[in-house]
Image (cartoon, rainbow, N blue to C red):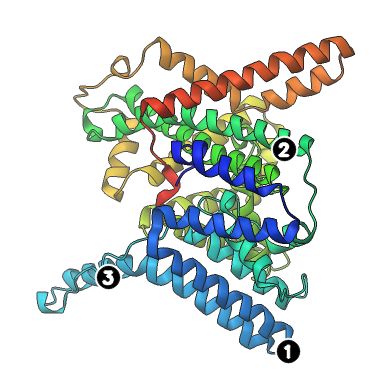
């Protein structure tokens, strides 16, 4: 079940909200737990047992740590969570590499293994990292282990952030599980944020998804240089507005139920360095790797060479976290390489450059990296990059095939809303006279209503609507 589906918008969410505001916190948590399990089971069916097993085991591991069996509980949690990820996300990848190695050395086909084709449970990369962060924090004594299974299970399965994040840590919400603020003002803010996210997904992300999927459906050698750039720029807007839209909707839904879910994006395309980009992109993941991998490796408290090795390790794992593919690994290492280059002195050069040139540098690096993220195989990546920077000997598809006035408008809208326009506008109107502020609020309310109705219209019409983060 997706947030932008009719079943969610017109049945699941209204029914849950109508029941939610009747009882106390305990009742609310039980209700959220049951509906969250239903939400996940709707699409994943019996695979929900994996998530529930992870929840039960890490609840027990937290208690083990609290009872004094500290290393046992921690090691058990890490083995269980990484084991689930390894089995369900990387087994096929391991089999492929094993078979490729045997083929490369000329081994008999009798030794080749058939791929098990294990299904990837939706959201497994997110909820395993959540539960693992809980046991690590209990081990570090940053939080106390909970003995309330309902509260812990509600935290793990909370449907707004279950399938696409943000990765919420127990320390960020444990007090809210016991006592959270639920009022009209917070609910209104939640509705606003949800509508913004829904419209970003349906209007902007899906438009660019259609363009990107069209461009990338052709072999690179039939594309002109301009068409290749349009394809990767469209993909960069697709992945940003798709993923940030889901984070917006998750944060909005959280506020409707009284939770303050942390921000996950802070306009990454206005970054002035790759380091700055990773402070703004998928914040919950980058901070997770910082706190649970980079710092334990020594962080920046070690020598220069070890520091660079730590960065490459973190971004190798970051790439692998996104998917079982060498392209994802290269994507991560590519970002890691530029972080190292910046630490070697490029950052000081960037600081002296004109601000637009800093942005141009970041966008160029990010766009090239997205090619590894989007294209399936390394030879296809190299072919696409060749067309982007050198061109094709005999191109057949030029930009005019994919562009029209509507698409030009959407490019303008995407560029505009890749910047903190809402923040600027709200700051401006909050300083105006009371009468103007009231009028602006009324206009803004009608604007949000229009976005909601238009987005619902697109959903009802069954427009092109891929969800890019299913694969992660």
Q: Residue at point 56% right, 44% down?
A: 15
Q: Residue at point 42% right, 71% down?
A: 86
Would you say 201 lies left or right of 150 here? Answer: left
Q: Nearer the viewer, mark 2 or mark 3?
A: 2
Q: Is residue 438 visible?
A: yes
Against 364, residue 469 (above or below) is below
Q: Residues within 10 Å of mark 2 (few under 14, many from 20)?
A: some
Location of residue 214 (image quadrant): top left
Residue 424's disc is: none
Would you say 309 lies left or right of 230 here? Answer: right
Between marks 3 and 1, how big is the CA–CA gap? 39 Å
Q: Earlier in the sequence, mark 2 or mark 1?
A: 1
Against 90, residue 337 (above or below) is above
Would you say 229 lies left or right of 387 here? Answer: right
- Please tell me which residue lies in front, 59 or 359: 59
Against 240, residue 63 (above or below) is below
Location of residue 121 (image quadrant): bottom left
The residue that mark 2 highlights is 187
Q: Are marks 2 and 3 in contact (CB under 8 Å)?
A: no
Secondary-structure class at tag 1: loop
Q: Are marks 2 and 1 in contact (CB under 8 Å)?
A: no
Q: Earlier in the sequence, mark 3 or mark 1?
A: 1
The residue that mark 1 highlights is 68
Q: Is residue 315 visible?
A: no
Between marks 2 and 3, how big is the CA–CA gap? 48 Å
Q: Earlier in the sequence, mark 2 or mark 3?
A: 3
The residue that mark 3 highlights is 95
């Amino acid at each position: 079940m997706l947030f932008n589906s009719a079943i969610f918008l017109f049945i699941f969410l209204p029914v849950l909200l109508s029941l939610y505001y009747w009882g106390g916190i305990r009742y609310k948590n039980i209700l959220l737990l049951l509906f969250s399990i239903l939400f996940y089971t709707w699409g994943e069916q019996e695979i929900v047992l994996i998530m529930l097993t992870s929840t039960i085991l890490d609840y027990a591991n937290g208690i083990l740590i609290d009872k004094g069996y500290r290393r046992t509980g921690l090691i058990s949690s890490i083995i269980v969570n990484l084991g689930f990820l390894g089995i369900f996300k990387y087994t096929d990848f391991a089999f492929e590499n094993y078979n490729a190695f045997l083929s490369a050395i000329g081994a008999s086909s009798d030794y080749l293994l058939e791929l098990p084709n294990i299904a990837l449970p939706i959201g497994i990369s997110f909820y395993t990292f959540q539960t693992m962060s809980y046991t690590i924090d209990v081990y570090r004594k940053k939080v106390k282990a909970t003995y309330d299974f309902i509260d812990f299970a509600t935290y793990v399965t909370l449907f707004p952030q279950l399938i696409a994040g943000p990765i919420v840590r127990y320390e960020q919400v444990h007090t809210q599980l016991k006592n959270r603020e639920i009022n009209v003002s917070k609910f209104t803010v939640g509705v606003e944020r949800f509508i913004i996210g829904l419209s970003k997904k349906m209007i902007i992300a899906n438009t660019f998804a259609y363009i990107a999927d069209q461009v990338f459906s052709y072999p690179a050698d039939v594309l002109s240089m301009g068409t290749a750039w349009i394809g990767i720029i469209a993909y960069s807007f697709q992945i940003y507005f798709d993923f940030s839209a889901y984070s917006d909707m998750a944060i909005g839904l959280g506020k409707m139920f009284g939770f303050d879910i942390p921000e996950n994006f802070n306009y990454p395309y206005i970054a002035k360095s790759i380091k700055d980009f990773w402070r703004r992109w998928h914040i919950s993941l980058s901070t997770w790797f910082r706190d649970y991998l980079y710092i334990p490796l020594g962080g920046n408290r070690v020598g220069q060479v070890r520091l660079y090795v730590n960065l490459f390790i973190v971004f190798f794992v970051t790439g692998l976290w996104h998917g079982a593919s060498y392209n994802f690994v290269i994507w991560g290492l590519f970002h890691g390489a530029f972080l190292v280059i910046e630490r070697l002195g490029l950052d000081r050069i960037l600081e002296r450059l004109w601000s637009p040139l800093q942005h141009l540098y970041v966008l160029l690096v990010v766009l090239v990296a997205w090619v590894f993220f989007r294209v399936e195989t390394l030879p296809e990546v190299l072919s696409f990059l060749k067309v982007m920077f050198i061109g094709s000997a005999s191109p057949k598809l030029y930009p005019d095939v994919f562009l029209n006035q509507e698409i030009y408008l959407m490019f303008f809208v995407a560029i505009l809303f890749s910047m903190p326009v809402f923040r600027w506008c709200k700051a401006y109107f909050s300083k105006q006279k009371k009468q103007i502020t009231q009028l602006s609020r009324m206009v803004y309310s009608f604007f949000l209503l229009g976005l909601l109705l238009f987005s619902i219209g697109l959903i009802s019409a069954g427009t092109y609507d891929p969800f890019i983060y299913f694969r992660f």
